[in-house]
Image (tube, rainbow, N blue to C red):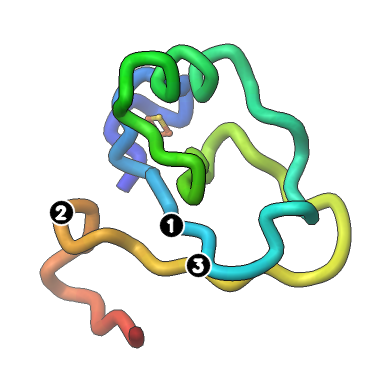
Amino acid sequence: MHACGKKGRCTTCKMIVLQGMENLSPETGPELAYRQQGRLRTDERLSCQSVLLQGELLIRVAKINQFPHIAYTE
Ligand code: FES
């Protein structure tokens, strides 16, 4: 989900990074703020704030952020 329109204000786009964290762009201000507040774990990034710079990325979407009409694989 991208409830805030990709402005880094909602965390509904949160992704749990299983592999490839090193391939993402540096954390943005909103991500650092959420991390300081304990709302973003070290294995999580906001998809609206991060860019895949190289290689591959394997993620999981937390149940709370999943759409009911989409089938997610684990
Ligand atoms: S879409 Fe709201 S924080 Fe990413």
Instruction: Please determine whether, in this image, residue 10 is positioned above or below residue 70.
Output: above
Q: Sequence order check: which comes first, mark 3 or mark 1?
A: 1
Q: Amino acid at mark 3?
A: Ile
Instruction: Please determine whether, in this image, residue 13 is positioned above or below residue 18.
Output: above
Please report contact status of discs 2 and 1: CB closer than 8 Å, yes or no.
Answer: no
Please report contact status of discs 2 and 3: CB closer than 8 Å, yes or no.
Answer: no
Other-residue count near label 3 (Cα within 10 Å), few / some / many at <14 / 14–19 / ≥20: some
Q: Compare residues 36 and 16 and report the one nearer the observer.
A: 36
Q: Amino acid at mark 1?
A: Ile
Q: Quadrant of residue 36?
A: top left
Q: Is residue 43 left or right of residue 70?
A: right
Identify the mark at residue 16; answer none if there is no mark.
1
In the rendering, at what x and y percent does residue 74 appear? 34, 85
Residue labelled with disc 2: 64
Q: Is residue 70 left or right of residue 69?
A: right
Q: Sequence order check: which comes first, mark 2 or mark 1?
A: 1
Instruction: Please determine whether, in this image, residue 35 is positioned above or below residue 12.
Output: above
- Calculate the distance from the C-alpha at mark 3 to the C-alpha at mark 1: 5 Å
Q: Sequence order check: which comes first, mark 2 or mark 3?
A: 3
Q: Compare residues 70 and 72 and report the one nearer the observer.
A: 72
Q: Is residue 52 left or right of residue 40?
A: right
Identify the mark at residue 63; answer none if there is no mark.
none
Q: Amino acid at mark 2?
A: Ile
In the rendering, at what x and y percent does residue 28 appear? 63, 21
- Calculate the distance from the C-alpha at mark 2 to the C-alpha at mark 3: 15 Å
Identify the mark at residue 59; answer none if there is no mark.
3
Q: Residue at horizontal 43%, vertical 53%?
A: 15
